[in-house]
Image: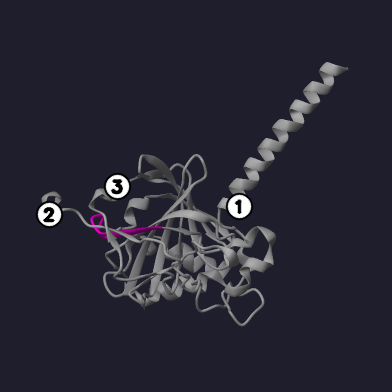
Amino acid sequence: MKLGFQYTTLFHSIFIILLLSSSCLTRAQEVDDQKEFSYDENTERGPSHWGSLHPEWEICSSGKKQSPIDIVNEVEVVPDLGRLHRYHKPSYATLVNRGHDITVKWNRAGYIQINGTIFELKQVHWHSPSEHTLHGRRFEMEAHLVHQSKDNRIAVVGILYKIGRPADTFLSMIEYELRSMIHTGDIERSIGVMDPNVIEFGSRDYYYRYMGSLTTPPCTEDVIWTIVGKVSTVTREQVNLMRKAVHDEAETNARPIQQLNERTVQLYRPRHSEI
């Protein structure tokens, strides 16, 4: 009887550990069903109310390291950060309408490496207008390439877009699927093998880095943000197509700017000898 009790106790302990690990992973990730919150400040589910919608979202209101932020001139130039190296590779992908944004999800599509830690690429999604601003300027669109380490840390690469030519190549590649989703109302569909390298960083020799949070609930903090310094181009038609494909009847899906709260924003620019 005593041995059976020990096995039962051990089983319960393992179950609790797994449950807590799963819970921590869920809290770390962005929610896949975004219908429970809104970007409309005139509603009770708007950004200023996110922290009160669920207990696990409370940090959306109380957090001191929230994103997005306005990146201003007062930055710390750190040449030792090094170039932004990406090791992405083609992999099977799924196009998902999460309720307020369109997301492309991958499985085993490579990684980026920051300070010796490998962060695997999980997905890319888009916000319009941009969430981050440069010196107060808000751009027409922003892409977030979300990466995750084995210990569930998050690293996001943000790319800002202005209206112009050429059109964004990656969005052009999924245009047919996006238009089909508008007509069919599909929430998810397989899009075959997609190469994330088609998403151009513009420049890996000029970027900003700071510690922030997810920009959607649960607003998890200690996210490593890398904002590419060079602004890319996207057409007005592509921006409009992304909004229409979501079906949320909203014109925007960008969280308001958050307080910097004495955080340091670093700027990587190579030394002249490295150029």
Residue drawn 16% across the image and 53% down it? 271
Q: For the residue labelled by badge 3, is the local secondary structure a helix, a strand or a loop? A: loop
The type of colouring in the image is one colour
Mark 1 packing: few (<14 Cα in 10 Å), some, or many (20+)?
some
Q: Which of marks 1 and 2 is in front?
A: 2
Relative placement, left or right, of 6 versus 219 is right
Relative placement, left or right, of 143 versus 50 is left
Position in image of residue 231 (x %, y %): 29, 68
Q: Which of marks 3 and 1 is in front?
A: 1
| Marker disc for residue 272 | 2
Query: On the image, numbered disc 1 is attached to which residue?
Result: 27
Q: What residue type is labelled 3?
A: His
Q: Which amino acid does label 1 sit on?
A: Arg
Query: On the image, numbered disc 3 is attached to which residue?
Result: 85
Residue with the most extreme bottom position:
42
Nearer to me, 243 or 139: 139
